Image (cartoon, grey):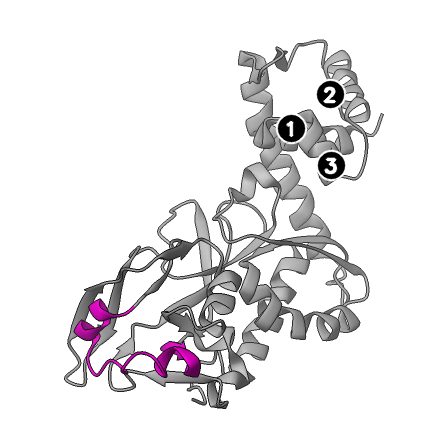
Amino acid sequence: MDRLDCIQSFVRVVEAGSFSAVARELNTSQPTISKQIAALEDYLDVQLLARSTRKLQLTQEGERFFEHCQEVLDAAAAAEASVGQRQNPVGTLRVSCPVAFGQHVLMPCIKDFLDRYPDIKLDLTLSDRFIDLVEEGTDLALRIGQVNDPTLITHHLGLTRRVTVGATTYFCKHPEPQTPEALVNHNCIVYTRLATGNEWHFQQPTGETVQVMAKGNLQTDNSTIIREAVLSGLGVAVCPVWLFGDLLNSDSLRIVLREYQPVPLPIHAVYRRGRFIPAKVRCFIKYLTNEFKLNLWVSDCGVNQ
């Protein structure tokens, strides 16, 4: 029995609340994980987990052991990092990212990153929901907007500037809005995962902010659907500039309300607080920080509109 492997499996089972989830994460079988926990319990001669058909629960001894195991794993990771200072970080890096952001911004960077770090295997999950990093076994998540979770450490990567857009075909049938208030006369396509919901915020030329309640016949939690709906001529939307890229300068799409900029949103890398930061996580954050500075669509320095 490799005690450290068993301890790692035990900690992840407690964090994820599931044997099967950890088995999928480690590319092994549920019986294998179960045998590791059983072997650990036999070695310690104590029951760590109370099992039922619905949930897992730590015993009193299991709670004490779990706390110490977290310290042991952190110490082991710190000890490995203290010697050698590997030039090439290794291991599987599990990253969560919003769907459209992953497609339009992150993916163009991936090949170069993996070429630079050939010993890293990237496990990328695209989802517009805010996942629980501990439960999902995720090392790092990219998030757009303010992060208010005190259990997470945030690292600023860039800025998502946004524009109000509609297809040229849509504006052939509807007059362009001259002020944000005029949007009440338009079919607004709403992205429901915004923290502000269907309340769109614009910065006026004076620097003040104006809010408008967006109304229309389509709302969705997927920004790729927003893109397709806009391009089909369904209505008007407030979108990140990277969602349309070079189409912003094409004849098929029109930017309106240029003097009233939608409030920009920060882009963060987030990871769990209180755990040792693996080299694979640190190098990925450093790489994206440098790449995003050079990317006009997400750089703090400006964007080409």
Rendered image quadrant of residue 3: top right
Report if residue 10 is visible in the image: yes
Q: In the displayed image of the protein, which residue is found farthest to the front?
A: 173
Please name the amino acid that badge 1 sits on: Val
Query: Percent position (x, y) of residue 162?
Result: 38, 75
Which one is nearer the viewer's eye here, 47 or 222? Answer: 222
Q: Quadrant of the N terminus?
A: top right
Report if residue 8 is visible in the image: no
Q: Quadrant of the C terminus?
A: bottom left
Callout 1 environment at 10 Å: few (<14), some (14 to 19), or many (20+)? many
Q: Residue 37 bears which disc, if any?
A: 2
**Chain part drawn in magenta:** 164-186
Residue 176 lies within the magenta run: yes
State the separation of the CA atoms marked 1 and 2: 9 Å
Rendered image quadrant of residue 180: bottom left
Q: Residue 221 bears which disc, if any?
A: none
Residue placed at 40% from the left, 68% from the top? 266
Q: Residue 24 bears which disc, if any?
A: 3
Name the residue beneath numbered marker 1: 13
Of callouts 3 and 2, which one flags the residue occurring earlier in the amino acid sequence? 3
State the separation of the CA atoms marked 3 and 2: 16 Å
Please name the amino acid that badge 2 sits on: Ile
Q: Element type at marker 2?
A: helix
The correct choice, above or below, for 63 with respect to 279 in the image is: above
